[in-house]
């Protein structure tokens, strides 16, 4: 499991105007953006501690917008605007003050949090003279600094005593929350976990949305029904699939009901930001992710002589590393022996191409290939029918299996048969058919 802590982005996309205004979007280094806003809104003659407290607020405000994907969730392609009516003042070609830039370079990857919340705190502020607001008053920080308060004390004065500063946060690329593909019945992974978490919280405000019981990060029938009801409530096409539009609508509603971009936020706890699947897979790892990796590599290596066909089990071992490095070399990826999100996407793409264009000399094996998604109760289709045909062959010699009707519908009888096989072969009794269960069923179907 891994907690998704905020990452300070290398770059930020700024819309030079109000959100709906026809204006340019520019991409600038995050540190340049913070220095520009601070130089636009603050006086360089202010006490250093005053400047520090204000810059912490500027950084945290920007990171809150980015972490919650506030503007992408509204359909925009930028992270933040240059308008102080909506965000912070960014002035194109603004002179940057040297002392302000120096402070920014020291603390750009520090941000404000409240209590045990994960997300950067929404540090609302205003100048304190022309305008006042709930939150930090910029001119007020000068008086507090002159009283001898440090930056954290100033922030706590305005935002509460449970305010803290996260120091030296990781810096990296700003990765979109949307995974880049549609999630549907049978999908598995952290994006599915995020969908299930968000919808279960949204249903507190919209109780017509059915509760999702699954905790495995697998897109099952319950998840599909919850998505359909969400789509119905928010006037989206009722497909039961989470495409980009549905993903960001869920994200927007989730952020809104939890008030993640508000001074009085419900907040995101470490538990809510903990995901089942790792962002990287390396030596010694095990789990559903490794089921997929081993199955994909095994199938690809069966037809590709550049990938060694080695024996694997449920653990990322020496053979796995050898196959992974060969795959990375073949497809122009960094040869590390560690599977990153980029490696995983390429692996999926190669396997899916294999499904669509399997070499003719191996045509007899096509029917045995795993369909690249989990099969579960309530599904229908040709892949379910293939599964049932394998189960029927097993039932002919193993009378302990409850039985199966080859009707293309994953019904209760099919689920019970799956569970019996999973029990007999220590596969984890879920009634779901992933790569390992599929492989075992195909293997058992060949027995006489």
Image (cartoon, helix red, strand yellow):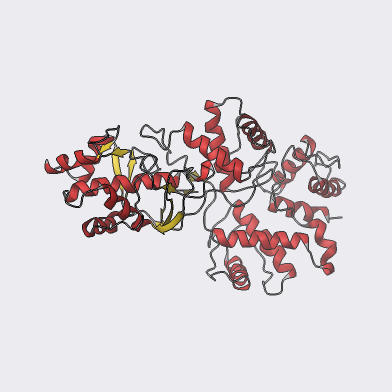
> Could you tell me if residue 345 is visible in this image?
yes
Locate residue 146 relative to residue 120 in the image: left or right: left
Q: For residue 99, what is the image quadrant?
A: bottom left
Q: Which residue lies furthest to the bottom in this view?
A: 306
Horizontal and vertical percent for residue 62? 38, 47
Tell me: 211 left or right of 69.
right
Q: Which residue is drawn at 27% across and 47% down?
A: 41
Q: Which of 197 and 39 is in front in this view?
A: 39
Q: Quadrant of residue 306?
A: bottom right
* Viewer can see residue 313: no
- Compared with residue 268, is residue 94 higher up or lower down, i.e. above or below? below
Residue in view at x 20 percent, y 40 percent: 139
Q: How many labels does the image show?
A: 0
Could you tell me which residue is drawn at 75 percent across and 38 percent down? 416
* Residue at the far left in the pictured view: 147
Q: Is residue 97 left or right of residue 84?
A: left
Query: Left or right of 447: which side holds 148?
Result: left
Q: Quadrant of residue 286?
A: bottom right
Look at the picture and state if 268 lies above or below 97: above
Q: Position of residue 246 (x, y in %)?
A: 61, 40
Q: Position of residue 232 (x, y in %)?
A: 65, 31
Q: In this picture, is 174 found above or below 71?
A: below
Instruction: Give the position of the C terminus as an image quadrant.
Output: bottom right
């Amino acid at each position: 499991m891994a907690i998704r802590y905020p990452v300070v982005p290398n770059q930020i996309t700024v819309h030079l105007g109000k959100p709906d205004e026809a204006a340019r979007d520019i991409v600038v280094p995050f540190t340049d953006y913070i220095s520009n806003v601070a130089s636009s809104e603050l006086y360089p003659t202010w006490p250093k501690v005053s400047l520090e407290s204000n810059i912490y607020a500027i950084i945290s405000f920007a990171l809150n917008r980015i972490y919650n994907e506030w503007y992408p969730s509204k359909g925009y392609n930028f992270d933040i605007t240059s308008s102080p009516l909506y965000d912070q003042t960014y002035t194109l070609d603004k002179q940057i003050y040297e002392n302000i830039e120096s402070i920014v370079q020291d603390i750009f990857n520090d941000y404000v949090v409240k209590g045990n919340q994960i997300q950067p705190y929404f540090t609302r502020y205003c100048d304190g003279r022309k305008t006042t607001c709930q939150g930090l008053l910029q001119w007020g920080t000068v008086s507090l600094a002159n009283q001898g308060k440090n930056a954290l004390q100033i922030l706590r004065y305005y935002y509460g005593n449970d305010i803290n500063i996260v120091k030296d946060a990781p810096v990296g690329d700003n990765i979109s929350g949307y995974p880049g593909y549609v999630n549907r019945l049978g999908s598995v992974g952290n994006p599915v976990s995020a969908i299930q978490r968000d919808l279960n919280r949204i249903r507190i405000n919209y109780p017509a949305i059915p509760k999702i019981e699954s905790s495995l990060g697998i897109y099952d029938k319950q998840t599909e029904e919850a998505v359909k009801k969400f789509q119905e409530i928010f006037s989206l096409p009722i497909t039961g699939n989470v495409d980009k539009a549905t993903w960001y609508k869920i994200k927007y509603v989730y952020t809104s009901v939890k008030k993640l971009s508000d001074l009085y936020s419900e907040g995101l706890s470490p538990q809510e930001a903990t995901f089942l699947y790792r962002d990287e897979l390396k030596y010694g790892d095990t789990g559903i992710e490794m089921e997929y990796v081993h199955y994909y590599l095994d199938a690809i290596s069966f037809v590709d002589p550049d990938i060694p066909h080695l024996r694997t089990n449920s653990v990322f071992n020496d053979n796995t590393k050898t196959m992974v490095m060969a795959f990375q070399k073949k497809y122009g990826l960094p040869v590390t022996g560690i599977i990153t999100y980029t490696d995983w996407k390429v692996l999926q793409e190669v396997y899916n191409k294999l499904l669509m264009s399997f070499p003719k000399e191996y045509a007899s094996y096509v029917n045995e290939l795993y369909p690249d998604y989990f099969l579960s109760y309530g599904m229908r289709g040709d892949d379910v029918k293939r599964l049932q045909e394998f189960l029927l062959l097993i039932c002919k010699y193993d009378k302990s299996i409850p039985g199966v009707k080859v009707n293309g519908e994953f019904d209760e009888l099919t689920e019970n048969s799956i569970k019996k096989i999973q029990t007999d072969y220590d596969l984890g009794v879920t009634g779901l058919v992933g790569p390992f269960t599929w492989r075992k069923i195909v293997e058992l179907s060949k027995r006489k």
